[in-house]
Amino acid sequence: MKLHRSLLFVPGIRENMLEKAAGSDADIVVLDLEDSVPPAEKARARELVGQHAPRIAAAGRQVHVRVNPGPEAREDISAVLSASVGGVSLPKVEGPQDVRDFDVLLREFELEREIRPGATALILWVESAQGLLRLGESLVASTRVAGAALGPEDYCNDLEIRHTPGGEELDFARNTVAVAAIGAGVIPLDGPYSDFRNDDGLRAESERVRQMGFKGRFCIHPAQIPIVNEAFSPAPEEVELARRIVEAYDAGVRDGRGAIQLEGRMIDVPVARRARRLLAAAAALEERAGPPRKESDS
């Protein structure tokens, strides 16, 4: 199971940040060629990202790239796509044709570079009312789609509304993205929290969107990563409860019961399934952390 709790944007033009990205604790490092790169610096950013992506991947990090929308996407993919790039963030998706066109582009360069066709995952960005309304169609327009992300600033701009600290104006969009993504069998991801010095706000919002169904979110500063990772990871008490649920339910099934009681609550099929998913997520986290360090290793 690949983890998608935290996805750190790294500006493709900032070589010092690219140098540090290999040591990031983010689940995915997203090398950005879009919003964080001025138009005059796009060519240089492509060059830098193409150089650094293999090195970051070799350090054990998952590497994605956010490309520019429209015609610039071809230049981006031509410059950076390699076997080291596991996924691409496609911004400002308005409908399924955008996805189909980009799928063809990716396949062209995958074949050219002897990468298995379809191996490069795709995360779609919802950043407009039109994109939100057609998200369900977009998510099934290519088998390489792995996730959907909400871009809060562009979405609010499209609706001509203010993005407030509480973010209540995003509730409908967030619920729609989460339901559409999970319904399509892909991962719902929240956009970045722009007030990167507000740890309490980030923690509260991340816990709130997790309860909506989101599995992770994008980060714009390394300091956000531990807060986001914690918010989208099962707490130890959740893991322990899930273990008790699965053990008790499986024992009940062996005894011929389809539902059981545990600690005053009914446990049936959906509750047991949810517990198993949580245990799978916990196991993936343990695998990423590796074996416990010995005292002599420190």
Image (cartoon, rainbow, N blue to C red):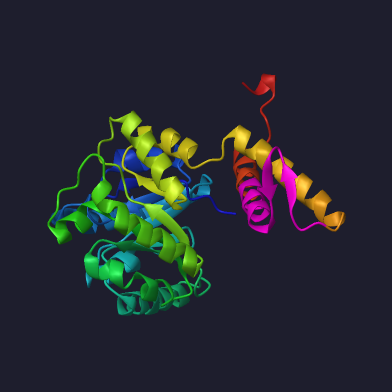
In the image, residue 152 above or below residue 183: above
The residue sitting at 25% across, 63% down in the picture is: 68
Question: Residue 276 lies in magenta, yes or no?
Answer: yes
Q: Residue at x 23, y 54 (%)?
A: 44
The magenta region covers: 257-279
Image position of 90 (left or right of 57): left
Between 164 and 53, the one nearer to me in the picture: 164
Q: Is residue 290 above or below residue 130?
A: above
**Residue 53: x %, y % from top left:** 41, 53
- Say if 215 sits above or below 196 in the image: below
Question: Would residue 175 appear left or right of 259 to someone viewing this image?
Answer: left
Q: The C terminus is located in which quarter?
A: top right
In this view, which residue lies farthest toward the front? 264
Residue 269 pos. (x, y %):
68, 58
Q: Residue 188 colored magenta?
A: no
In which image quadrant can residue 26 be found?
Answer: top left
Answer above or below: position of 239 versus 89.
above
- Could you say where residue 109 lies in the image, as x and y percent from the top left? 40, 74
- Is 158 placed left or right of 58 in the picture? left
- Image quadrant holding the N terminus, namely bottom right
Horizontal and vertical percent position of residue 135: 35, 70
Residue 3 visible: yes
